Amino acid sequence: MKQARLPAPYIPDHRWRAFATLAVAVFISILDLFIVNIAFPSIEREWPGAGLSGLSWVLSAYAIVLAALLVPLGQLGDLIGRRRVFQAGLGVFVLGSALCAAAPSPEILIAARVLQGAGAAALTPTSLSMLLPLFSARERPMVIGAWAALGGVGAAMGPPLGGLRVQASWRWIFLVNVPLGLVALYGSPSRHEVLHAFHRGYGYIRACSLPAALTLLALAAKARRNPQPALATS
């Protein structure tokens, strides 16, 4: 009697390649919660008539949209496919970043930040859902810890990276996201990889989705509570 052929196991390099590319996407989405703060003085100098209260929406719009859509878009990924929602979200985030870099007015910049926030809300929860099935149960706590650490690293690296980019132009804060996002889009796990591994990690994904979402909501709330600390700098 011919035995059913079992699917080949994952090659570890493929799993960590997937982790690296998805981590890039999550990192730049979290970084954009904090990095824009340091660019406020430069943005204000370019559009002095916009006013401080108006320009504060450049940061607030991103944080509010991310916090509002994070859980619904994560659930949408459960319904129509995590890879599909991740790639759509990353594409929207990259498009929003390009529009931010080219924005001719504060209104266009704020609208592009809304687009960025929606993309980040789609890619962030689905990235974890795509990663976990690729790893064994023993490896998943390590993967979750590394994924969660991206939030802290993004928050810590925002001011220094923002300061370096602003030396050239505040628009570089957004422009750098475009090639990084395209690399992450190209290197994201294939549909076959995601479907092949999904059945092994579904319960674990459901158990970890809410804590991960709450962590990101806390980061968004932190950015929203204090949107103007860099405005006093010269």
Image: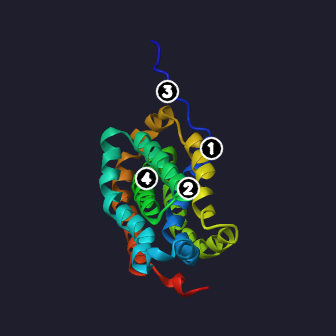
Image depth: mark 3 or mark 1 in front:
1
Of pointers 3 and 1, the one earlier in the residue sequence: 3
Label 4 sits on what residue type? Gly
Of pointers 2 and 1, the one earlier in the residue sequence: 1
Q: Is residue 177 left or right of residue 85?
A: right
Label 3 sits on what residue type? Leu
Q: Where does residue 136 sit, x and y in percent of width and height?
A: 50, 48
Q: Badge 4, how many Cα within 10 Å: few under 14, some, many 20+?
A: many
Image depth: mark 2 or mark 1 in front:
2
Of pointers 3 and 4, the one earlier in the residue sequence: 3
Image depth: mark 4 or mark 1 in front:
4
Label 2 sits on what residue type? Ala
Of pointers 4 and 2, the one earlier in the residue sequence: 2
Residue that numbered label 4 is attached to: 119
Q: Badge 2, how many Cα within 10 Å: few under 14, some, many 20+?
A: some
Q: Which mark is residue 102?
A: 2
Question: What kind of element bears circle 4?
Answer: helix
Q: Is residue 155 visible?
A: no
On screen, 219 above or below 5?
Answer: below
Q: Residue furthest top?
A: 1
Residue that numbered label 3 is attached to: 6
Please identify the quarter of the rendering in which residue 60 is found: bottom left
Label 1 sits on what residue type? Pro
Please tell me which residue lies in front, 150 or 5. 150
On screen, 55 above or below 101?
Answer: below
Residue that numbered label 1 is attached to: 12
Badge 3 vs badge 4, beta-carbon distance below 8 Å: no
Image depth: mark 3 or mark 4 in front:
4
In space, the residues marked 4 and 2 are separated at their CA atoms by: 18 Å
